Image: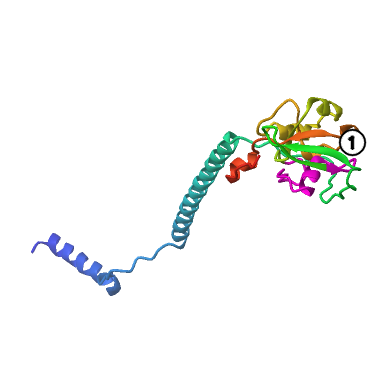
Amino acid sequence: MSSALRSASRHASRAQRLIPSSVTSLTPCTPVRCYHSTRATQHVQGATSSWRMNQRMVGTENSLRIANRNLWRKVSSTPRLRGFHASAVSRHMGIDRPAPGTGIKVHFENSDGTPIKTCEANEGDNILAIAHEYDIDLEGACEGSVACSTCHVILDPEIYDILPEPEDDENDMLDMAFGLTDTSRLGCQVNVTKEMDGMKCRLPAATRNMFVDGKKSSH
């Protein structure tokens, strides 16, 4: 062996002796996760979860907004009913009959002019109350609160002209009355006076409530 080779071998042996045995017998180590790396990963995952939740909330909010818009369109397209406004009404549901021959005579007739009954009333009594007192088939579903047209009656022109002009509440209800005429009034709004003695009061052939309830008029 040459001197060069021996020198190299000697240096190699010396270097091997200087290396600790713990280094020469390396074993695989368990990887350790960095604390900061773990926190960063958790932060990213939390942000992703929050973003997804926000997206779901935004989607829900948009769905609610669309549903509300559709509901509003449906409500807006639905025909509106005119509101009822009750005016001051003089109610005489349970009037006292005057002594025979002393009251104001009211002649009730069917739609074809056939007489029904002649009644006597006191001054100030209204047609609806008079009809109920004498069992005449004049409905009056709202009991005189000017919220229906079921006490609609037809008067002679000379009697109609005696009465005060109907108020807006009454006109609104008369617009819905069946068989409306130029001398139509609501019976609950017609208070009799002495100058109306002998008046005729004609009942229409039907009322709106009769169509709804399927009731047939007896007039």
Tell me the SS state at disc 1: loop
At x 64% / y 38%, what residue is drawn?
A: 206
Applied colour scheme: rainbow
Where in the figure is residue 199, as x and y percent of width and height? 82, 33
Residue sitting nearer the eye, 51 or 58: 58
Q: Identify the residue at the far bottom of this view.
A: 21
**Which amino acid, by three-letter code, is at mark 1?**
Thr
Left or right placement of residue 59 versus residue 19 in this view: right
Q: Identify the residue at the far left of this view.
A: 1
Is 197 included in the stretch rendered in magenta?
no
Q: How many marks?
A: 1
Residue sitting nearer the eye, 149 or 27: 149
Mark 1 Cα within 10 Å, few/some/many (few <14, many 20+)?
some
Up/down of 141 relative to 76, above or below: below
Q: Which residue is mark 1?
A: 193
Q: Which SS does the magenta portion mostly show? A: loop
Quadrant into which the C terminus falls: top right
Rendering quarter of residue 9: bottom left
Left or right placement of residue 165 versus residue 63 in this view: right
Residue sitting nearer the eye, 10 or 195: 195
Is 135 included in the stretch rendered in magenta?
yes
Where in the figure is residue 169, as x and y percent of width and height? 77, 35
At x 86% / y 37%, what residue is drawn?
A: 192
Where in the figure is residue 138, as x and y percent of width and height? 72, 43
Rendering quarter of residue 144: top right
Task: Judge whether residue 89 can be spotted in this image.
Answer: no
Up/down of 186 relative to 24, above or below: above
Left or right placement of residue 2 versus residue 158 in this view: left
Q: Which residues are magenta?
A: 120-147
Q: Identify the residue at the far front of this view.
A: 101
At x 28% / y 69%, what residue is drawn?
A: 28
Residue sitting nearer the eye, 119 or 76: 119
